[in-house]
Amino acid sequence: MSITEQNELNKKYDARKKYLRAKETAEYLSIGLSTVWLYAKEGKLTPKKISTRVTVFSIEEINSLINGDIAKVA
């Protein structure tokens, strides 16, 4: 991902946010919602449950996934 694309995404998803919901994560990564949950199941993303109906994902971890920095593989 280029720096320009990263800057555009940061503008769209308020750079002050630390977490994204599953749907936002899918949009951010340009993947389907089911793929977000597959990545969580495979250990590529760590879901954080903040209530019974709300799960979020760390933007730092998402960016690491984009940059290929995550060594976790299913």
Image (tube, rainbow, N blue to C red):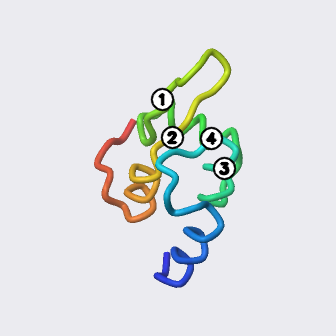
Determine contact: label 4, label 3, CB under 8 Å. Answer: yes
Determine contact: label 2, label 1, CB under 8 Å. Answer: yes
Residue under label 4: 21
| Image quadrant where residue 38 sits | top right
Distance from Cα at disc 3 to Cα at disc 2: 9 Å
| Image quadrant where residue 69 sits | bottom left
Amino acid of disc 1: Lys
Q: Residue at x 66, y 49 (%)?
A: 24
CA neighbours of label 4 inside 10 A, class few (<14), some (14 to 19), many (20+): some
Residue under label 2: 57
Amino acid of disc 4: Arg
Determine contact: label 3, label 2, CB under 8 Å. Answer: no
CA neighbours of label 1 inside 10 A, class few (<14), some (14 to 19), many (20+): few
Say the numbered circle drawn on residue 24: 3
Residue under label 1: 48
Q: Earlier in the sequence, mark 1 or mark 4?
A: 4
Q: Residue at x 66, y 60 (%)?
A: 30
Element under label 4? strand
* Residue 15 location (% of width, % of height): 51, 63
Seen as rendered, the residue at the extreme top is 52
Distance from Cα at disc 2 to Cα at disc 4: 6 Å
Is 63 on the left-hand or right-hand side of 14? left
Determine contact: label 2, label 4, CB under 8 Å. Answer: yes
